[in-house]
Image (cartoon, rainbow, N blue to C red):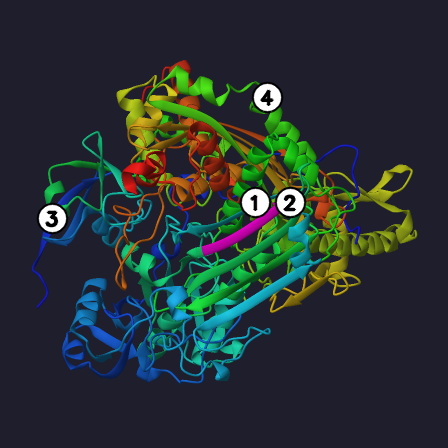
């Protein structure tokens, strides 16, 4: 497992551990970067959508005549163009490319038009008549699961499932994890807290709306560019939804205007490919912001019943978590989110007796799926408040109870997986000292100081994984001795191209400018499951280091032949050369070695590696598990976070003026980019904590616009945020690295909620912690 | 029937540009689709996100809310034009150094708002930067490095006596 711990005495420029500027800086900062909406192809048509006005209705027919008669309309597609057997889905293949025979949510795509201009396409879409037979809808997950509720899918038995989902009626999937003997453990508890928590749908709001551009060649082969987090998932989804062999579809990527899970599975790509196939011309379709809100996906609304028990000394011994997720109309990533949320439900604590179980309900709403944190922000909002409540009941310090119970060396995760590196203790130390926690004013003093405003500090901790599914890398040495790195990993803005190039440069001891990055291409790149699950630095980084190691072996072999010595006597030298160990004068440049390989003997130097994460999630001797869709997932990063909250008792409005975050990310390959992930996640988390909430008016999303859905602006973020990168050495990671992409959002809402308790005594159980909810919690007798 | 279109002369980045425009076409549509000036982004088409921010007669406007017909006598500047200016280059350098962007989709609008701020106030403090730029949304960076970058560029420009 120890693939990449080799260290060099002197670091080349751009090497691992340096805050190298993002490789795409110049093109992004001069406006030259091309995102999907910036792409044009000769003869390109523009697409537009027609969406369903109903949450649940049979489609009895279409009248396309008026739309077809409009000058400039080139193709119209509807469910009639689809085969019912062709369905896509990450876990349950339940989703057609667009509504087929019936609509299952308000806003679902029912038809699409390709026309000479976007205006004509939009006008034509409005001229399409769809004849509906409206049916009763199941809009709430709890009632959707009751006997007699309107069914979202009639025949779930016929759907292909990639794990034991237990799908039945409106039950999309169910998962259960058990350790210890929970039922008898409650009797040993001196303190038990139990509460039901509610968390809202959260919209991703990547600044770039989703879109796609498809082009078909004379032989019928399709090239597809789209806003995505994985060209390979786009390829798989489109091919499943349209019944195409993968050889018929090449997926490419422009620059991506951020993805937080929304661009991982399909959005509009299958529809755009269908339009291009029918029009036999290139078609580009970019979603409006409103369409992006309504048709892509969002974070799951969740209901969490949680019960935690502890001994008088603060030792946590019992935990039950029951999770109900609103999955929306299609499975998408819901079974994964449920399983992962339950795996992480205890947080980084040892709790001997646990039963975590939950369900995903199909409802007649938009699909809910992956969003940074993948279920962990929801369960952490509940869990970290319960730890806090137990500490208060036992009159223990918030840090003390966490230190007493946290995972330490040798401890295993829920389910039984090993933890190889753990800097949680250092994280707690860093934020305790940084925030001045021990010297913070007592609650009574903050009240006395100002009659209208109360301040308090809140602490929460969490963890995330780094390793999941398959990835690869190819490192090619070009004729002149420079290197081309090809991983298939889409850089969605976080800077993975830069971090991976740094690792490649480090491994071969060359400056960064000798390494170019190939853009992900399903024709030419090795498989990469995706830029998701916080996995690229760890998973793909390992492949990069291993592929570079293959290149090093070949360089040494050919250099040995050229210099008439054994490959074992050859050493890499900094700056792109090799030499005979101990003989400074005997050296060859990479260009000389590559020229020899290209033109004389051996053949071009190509190193490759692929692997799949294969560390078992569950030890069956330790845990009893049902329906967990991740057989292998692990390698844990850790975070501890303190926030200072200020509550205006006249309005209930909460501000977060200061925050302190410490994260154990293993080795920080690029510290500035690690900070960037933590900083961005804090602010997204503050939005989740305080203002962001998707609201439905009956079946219809009531706030699908940036005017009505409020993400944080520059005026609302903490003016002060201290970040501490705690570097541990992950023995399985590339240069010791672990993950950071999602980690920073997990604990934010819980920390803010705990801060509100300290400031005011009010404990809130429903997100967001809006002024209205806080106000009601402050003055409960006025709202009885 | 399609709406009638007229030929208009626009002043964009110091040059005359002839475009065919319907009464309802926004400046953003004309810039992006007719003049292939795609630095300005369409993030919401509602004037909220600020990704389409351009300069009109020295002041920032939302190109998505500006009708092209209303811009015939105005001097329009986009990032493609401002790229040539030393003051914009100072901002770009600071944005790169401070990682004040990630995906880059908000960056053109963010840079233009910062540039306009420094034009009117060469010595802003952090609160003034936050207030002046709160109309530009970013979902990646958490904003903190943007504030630092703008202050850094302002200090650099003052030291060089290079007012925007």
In the depicted view, which residue is nearer to us: A414 or A452? A452
Residues at discs 3 and 2 in contact (Cβ within 8 Å): no
* A371 and A25: which is toward the camera: A371
Q: Position of residue A82 (x, y in %)?
A: 37, 82
Mark 2 vs mark 4: in front: 4
The chain that hosts pointer 4 is A
Q: Is residue A536 left or right of residue B16?
A: right
Q: CA distance from mark 1 to mark 3?
A: 52 Å
Rendered residue at 51%/75% (across/down): A167
SS category of the residue bearing label 4: helix
Separation of marks 2 and 4 at Cα, in angstroms: 26 Å
Name the residue at 33% across, 58% down. Answer: A292
Question: Which residue in the structure is indicated by mark 4?
Answer: A438
Residue A743's tag is 1
Badge 4 crowding class, 10 Å Cα cut-off, few under 14, some 14 to 19, many 20 or more, is few
Mark 4 and mark 3: Cα distance apart in space = 67 Å
Q: Position of residue A330 (x, y in %)?
A: 42, 70
Marks 4, 1: nearer the viewer: 4
Q: Are marks 2 and 4 in contact (CB under 8 Å)?
A: no
Q: Mark 3: give few (<14), some (14-19) or many (20+) Cα within 10 Å.
A: some
Q: Chain of mark 3?
A: B
Asked if marks 1 and 2 touch (Cβ < 8 Å), the reply is yes
- Residue drawn at x 59%, y 74% is A164
Secondary element under disc 3, as helix, strand or loop, is strand
Q: CA distance from mark 4 to mark 1?
A: 25 Å
Q: Position of residue A367 (x, y in %)?
A: 40, 64
Whether labels 4 and 3 belong to a single chain: the reply is: no
* Residue of label 3: B8
What span is colored magenta in the figure?
Answer: A303-309
């Amino acid at each position: 497992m120890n693939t990449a711990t080799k260290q060099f005495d002197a670091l080349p420029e751009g090497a691992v551990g340096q805050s190298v500027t993002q490789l795409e800086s110049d093109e992004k900062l001069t406006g030259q970067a091309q995102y999907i909406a910036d792409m044009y192809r000769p003869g390109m048509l523009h697409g537009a959508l027609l969406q369903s006005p109903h949450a649940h209705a049979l489609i009895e027919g279409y009248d396309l005549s008026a739309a077809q008669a409009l000058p400039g309309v080139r193709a119209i597609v509807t469910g009639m163009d689809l085969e019912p057997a062709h369905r896509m889905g990450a876990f349950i293949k339940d989703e057609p490319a667009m509504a087929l025979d019936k609509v299952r949510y308000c806003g679902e795509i029912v038809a699409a038009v390709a026309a000479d201009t976007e205006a004509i396409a939009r006008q034509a879409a409005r001229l399409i008549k769809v004849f509906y037979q409206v049916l009763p809808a199941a809009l709430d997950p709890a009632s959707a699961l009751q006997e007699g509720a309107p069914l979202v899918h009639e025949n779930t038995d016929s759907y292909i499932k990639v794990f034991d989902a237990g799908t039945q009626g409106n039950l999309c999937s169910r998962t259960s994890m058990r350790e210890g003997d929970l039922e008898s453990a409650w009797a040993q508890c001196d303190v038990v807290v139990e509460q039901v928590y509610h968390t809202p749908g959260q919209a991703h709001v990547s600044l770039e709306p989703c879109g796609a551009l498809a082009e078909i060649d004379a032989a019928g082969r399709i090239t597809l560019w789209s806003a995505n987090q994985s060209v390979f998932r786009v390829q798989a989804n489109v091919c499943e939804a349209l019944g195409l062999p993968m050889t018929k579809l090449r997926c490419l990527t422009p620059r991506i205007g951020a993805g937080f899970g929304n661009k991982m599975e399909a959005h509009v790509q299958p529809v755009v490919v269908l339009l291009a196939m029918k029009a036999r011309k290139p078609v580009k379709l970019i979603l409006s912001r409103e369409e992006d809100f309504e048709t892509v996906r969002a974070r799951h609304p969740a209901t969490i019943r949680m019960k935690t028990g502890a001994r008088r000394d603060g030792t946590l011994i019992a935990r039950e978590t029951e999770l109900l997720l609103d999955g929306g109309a299609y499975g998408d990533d819901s079974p994964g989110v449920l399983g992962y949320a339950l795996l992480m439900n205890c947080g980084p604590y040892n709790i001997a007796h646990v039963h975590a179980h939950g369900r995903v309900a199909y409802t007649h709403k938009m699909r809910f799926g992956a969003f940074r944190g993948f279920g962990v922000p929801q369960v952490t909002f509940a869990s970290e408040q319960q730890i806090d409540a137990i500490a208060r009941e036992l009159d223990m310090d918030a840090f003390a109870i966490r230190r007493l119970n946290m995972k330490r060396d040798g401890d295993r995760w829920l389910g039984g997986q090993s933890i190889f590196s753990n800097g949680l203790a250092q994280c707690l130390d860093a934020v305790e000292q940084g925030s001045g926690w021990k010297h913070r004013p007592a609650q009574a003093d903050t009240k006395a100081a100002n009659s209208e405003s109360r301040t308090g500090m809140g602490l929460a901790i969490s963890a995330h994984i780094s390793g999941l599914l398959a990835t690869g890398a190819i490192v090619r040495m070009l004729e002149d001795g420079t290197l081309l790195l090809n991983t298939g990993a889409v850089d969605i803005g976080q800077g993975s191209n830069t971090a991976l190039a740094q690792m490649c440069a480090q491994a071969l001891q060359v400056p960064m400018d000798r390494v170019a990055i190939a853009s992900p291409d399903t024709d030419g790149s090795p498989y990469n499951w995706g830029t998701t699950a916080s996995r690229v630095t760890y998973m793909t980084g390992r492949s990069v280091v291993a592929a570079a190691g293959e290149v090093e072996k070949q360089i040494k072999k050919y250099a040995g032949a050229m210099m008439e010595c054994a490959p074992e006597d050859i050493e890499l030298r900094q700056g792109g050369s090799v030499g005979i160990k101990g003989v400074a004068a005997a050296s060859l440049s990479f260009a000389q070695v590559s020229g020899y390989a290209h033109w004389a003997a051996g053949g071009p130097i190509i190193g490759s590696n692929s692997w799949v994460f294969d560390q078992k999630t569950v030890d069956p001797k330790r845990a009893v598990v049902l329906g967990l869709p991740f057989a292998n997932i692990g390698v844990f990063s850790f975070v501890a976070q303190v926030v200072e909250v200020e509550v205006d008792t006249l309005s209930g409005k909460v501000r977060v003026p200061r925050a302190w975050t410490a994260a154990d990310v293993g080795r920080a390959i690029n510290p500035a980019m690690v900070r960037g992930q933590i900083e961005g996640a804090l602010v997204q988390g503050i939005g989740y904590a305080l203002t962001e909430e998707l609201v439905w008016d009956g079946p219809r999303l009531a706030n699908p616009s940036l005017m009505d859905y409020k993400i944080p602006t520059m005026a609302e973020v903490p003016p002060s945020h201290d970040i501490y990168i705690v570097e541990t050495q992950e023995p399985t990671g590339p240069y010791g690295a672990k993950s950071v992409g999602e980690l920073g959002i997990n604990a934010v809402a819980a920390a803010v909620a705990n801060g509100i308790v300290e400031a005011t005594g009010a404990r809130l159980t429903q997100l967001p912690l809006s002024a209205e909810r806080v106000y009601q919690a402050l003055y409960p007798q006025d709202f009885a | 029937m399609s709406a009638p279109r007229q030929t208009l002369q626009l002043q964009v980045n110091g040059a005359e540009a002839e475009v065919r425009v319907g009464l309802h076409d926004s400046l953003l549509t004309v810039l992006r689709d007719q003049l292939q000036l795609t630095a300005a982004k369409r993030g919401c088409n509602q004037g909220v996100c600020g990704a389409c921010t351009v300069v009109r007669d020295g002041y920032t406007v939302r190109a998505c809310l500006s009708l092209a017909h209303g811009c015939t006598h105005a001097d329009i500047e986009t990032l493609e034009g401002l790229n040539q200016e030393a003051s914009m280059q100072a901002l770009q350098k600071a944005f790169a150094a401070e990682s004040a962007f990630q995906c880059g989709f908000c960056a053109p609008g963010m840079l233009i708002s910062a540039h306009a701020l420094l034009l009117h106030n060469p010595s802003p403090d952090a609160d003034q930067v936050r207030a002046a730029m709160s109309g530009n949304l970013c979902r990646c960076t958490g904003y903190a490095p943007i504030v630092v970058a703008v202050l850094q560029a302002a200090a650099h420009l003052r030291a060089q006596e290079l007012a925007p």
